[in-house]
Image (cartoon, coloured by chain):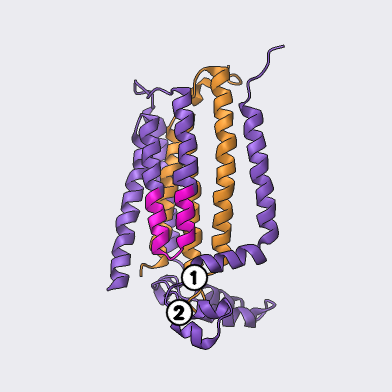
Chain colours: A purple, B orange
């Protein structure tokens, strides 16, 4: 019952997000486009929540729908951009864009529904291992790892709070009582141990971005 | 639960709408918004793969960390991109991409 509801909610939010994305492209007024983009990001965050990635959902809301959107609206207001009054969008260009985007969407759909495990229920990695044989180094290891994976066509695996608690260092008895899935804890563990150095480098990228924005945005002196 | 393929199709549709927007729209600010939408669409497929590849009920968190990095880089990119748009507006008095034709003429 619960999974049926989450499944229905995914389709509702996905359709709403796609409609809002259409709105971003279709509206002539940039402010309407920005508002549609905020809604689109909100629905995307809802899809993240449905997938059990609560932390990324909140980050999506705070960073995209909060910070980035406000920056966009700020620039639109500051530059006092008018809506495109007359239809200057050329029809051939729109046709080309729709054809390219349609080809891309069709290609992605084709690939997604014809993933090796989608119909047979087999894992793609396993199929690959069997076709290569035991020539590749570490093929046995891949084979066992692949058997633990779910096939792509089947429903996604359920999250297991008990396994997550053991991963975080709890003993068996406490882990068995765990009810909520500690998404943020696990993400933080991965971020601050395995990916600690990239995380620090990322902060330099943000600093460079800030300095660059100030340098580009200042008034040029005429001399 | 919904199969992985549906998440991937959703992500692909969102990406292609963004792509169409980048090609169609003349207003640079809206083009930039569509670029952000494409980044966000790529994030959806990363998170979906992270969930689907999970072993023993724990998602693969490498993909989610990557998605987090993409969000942070997107924030830095927006700051620089909007500064460039402001600089362009100062130079051209317009945000239409059709006014950027110095090399063409």
Q: Which residues are magenta?
A: A42-62
Residue at the spot of label 2? A178
> Spatial distance from mark 2 to mark 1, Cα to Cα?
9 Å
Instruction: Identify the main secondary structure in magenta.
Output: helix
Question: Residue at 28% across / 67% down in the picture?
Answer: A5
The residue lying toward the viewer, choosing from A201 and A173, is A173
Image point (32%, 66%), residue name: A6
Image coordinates of residue A25 in percent, x first then y, are 38, 37
Q: Quadrant of the C terminus of chain A?
A: top right
Residue B65: percent from left, percent from top? 57, 60
Chain that bears disc 2: A
Residue at the spot of label 1 = A182
Front position in the image: A80 or B98: A80
Task: From the viewer's perspective, tell me whether residue B74 is left or right of residue A38.
Answer: right
Query: What chain does badge 1 belong to?
Result: A
Judge whether residue A135 is colored magenta: no
A196 above or below B100? below
Q: Residue at x 50, y 88 (%)?
A: A173
Q: Are marks 2 and 1 in contact (CB under 8 Å)?
A: yes
Residue at image coords 42%, 37%:
A96
């Amino acid at each position: 019952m619960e999974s049926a509801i989450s499944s229905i909610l995914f389709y509702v939010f996905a359709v709403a997000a796609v409609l809002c994305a259409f709105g971003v492209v279709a509206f002539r007024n940039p402010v309407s486009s920005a508002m549609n983009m905020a809604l689109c990001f909100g629905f995307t965050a809802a899809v993240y929540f449905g997938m059990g990635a609560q932390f990324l959902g909140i980050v999506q809301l705070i960073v995209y729908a909060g910070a980035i959107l406000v920056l966009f609206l700020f620039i639109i207001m500051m530059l006092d951009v008018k809506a495109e009054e007359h239809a200057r969008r050329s029809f051939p260009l729109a046709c080309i864009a729709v054809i390219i985007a349609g080809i891309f969407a069709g290609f992605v759909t084709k690939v997604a529904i014809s993933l090796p495990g989608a119909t047979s229920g087999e894992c793609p990695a396993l199929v690959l291992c069997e076709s290569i044989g035991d020539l590749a180094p570490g093929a046995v290891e891949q084979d066992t790892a692949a058997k633990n994976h779910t096939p792509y066509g089947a429903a996604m695996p359920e999250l297991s709070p008990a396994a997550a608690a053991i991963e975080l260092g709890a003993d068996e008895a406490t882990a068995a009582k765990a009810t909520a899935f500690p998404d943020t804890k696990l993400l933080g563990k991965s971020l601050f141990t395995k990916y600690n150095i990239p995380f620090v480098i990322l902060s330099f990228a943000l600093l460079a971005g800030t300095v660059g924005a100030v340098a580009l945005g200042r008034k040029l002196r005429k001399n | 639960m919904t199969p992985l393929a549906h998440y991937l199709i959703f992500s692909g549709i969102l990406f292609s709408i963004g792509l169409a927007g980048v090609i169609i729209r003349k207003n640079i600010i809206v083009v930039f918004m569509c670029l952000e939408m494409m980044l966000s669409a790529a994030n959806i497929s990363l998170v979906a793969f992270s969930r689907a590849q999970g072993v023993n009920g724990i998602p693969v968190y490498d993909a989610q960390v990557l998605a987090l990095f993409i969000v942070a880089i997107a924030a830095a990119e927006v700051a620089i991109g909007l500064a460039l748009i402001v600089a362009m507006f100062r130079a051209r008095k317009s945000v239409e991409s059709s006014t950027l034709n110095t090399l063409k003429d």
